[in-house]
Amino acid sequence: DAGVIQSPRHEVTEMGQEVTLRCKPISGHDYLFWYRQTMMRGLELLIYFNNNVPIDDSGMPEDRFSAKMPNASFSTLKIQPSEPRDSAVYFCASRHGGATGELFFGEGSRLTVL
Amino acid sequence: GESVGLHLPTLSVQEGDNSIINCAYSNSASDYFIWYKQESGKGPQFIIDIRSNMDKRQGQRVTVLLNKTVKHLSLQIAATQPGDSAVYFCAEHRRGGGADGLTFGKGTHLIIQP
């Protein structure tokens, strides 16, 4: 299996622009998570899905952030409009329902908002 | 790497020596603990886990110790190799926390000196 695939790996954009990050989870995994990582706050859970349904989005910082999972093999995290404080590495992770802690992470999307 | 920053504690050891990385957790209701390794430019990778009803678990070159009395977790890496250089995160799972019950620590940067 190719693992969790994220794109783009790097994104540089200007404040106010829309940013869309994409994720393909591992086939057969029914949980998908979006995390944000910064030096100051570490790894923060933004939202997670179970069987394509959003279960908990309490970690989403503001209404500017939205996430969708239209099918079992694809999810997006969108920021509109983006702000410099959104600069971070965004990770997507997936896991099988029976494995509580073993998350499989993608390589991340590094976002820089100027 | 994206997760390494000035604020991360750093542990430097000579190649071939053993290393011990420590982690304090806060929630006495946590039922499951996990160690992740994050290499520069990559996502976190599962290393080993331990349930709260255990106090020690061994893997290949790694051992995790759990002291529930003082809420302390440690990761021991034997005969360190250059490839062990990374940031190591502990994570705790809250009993009843559901799928999103993982809380990650800030991480420790392990440097292997040649």
Image: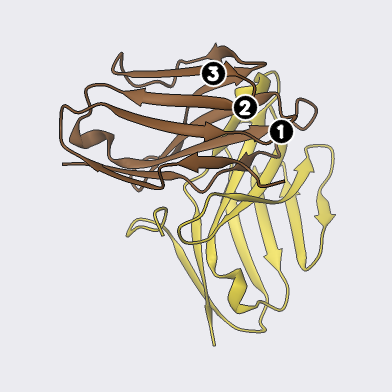
Chain colours: A brown, B yellow
Q: CA distance from mark 1 to mark 2?
A: 7 Å
Q: Chain of mark 2?
A: A
In depth, the one of A4 and A47 nearer the eye is: A4
The disc at residue A73 is 2
Task: Return the disc, 3 or 1, that comes first in the chain's sequence.
Answer: 1
B41 shown above or below A106: below
Name the image quarter holding the C terminus of chain A.
top left
Q: Residues within 10 Å of mark 1 (few under 14, many from 20)?
A: some
Helix, strand, or loop for circle 2?
Answer: loop
Residue A27, numbered circle:
1
Q: Quadrant of residue A28?
A: top right
The quarter of the picture where residue B17 lies is: bottom right
Q: Residue at x 46, y 25 (%)?
A: A76
**What residue is shown at x 61% (from left), y 70% (from top)?**
B84
Classify mark 3: helix, strand or loop: strand
The amino acid beneath tag 1 is Ser
- Residues tagged by mark 1 and mark 2 found on one chain of the structure: yes
Amino acid type at image mark 3: Met
Tell me what residue is drawn at x 55 percent, y 22 percent. Answer: A48
Residue position for label 3:
A69
Left or right: where A14 falls relative to B77: left
Q: Do circles 2 and 3 both sit on a common chain?
A: yes
Dots 2, 3 in contact, CB < 8 A:
no
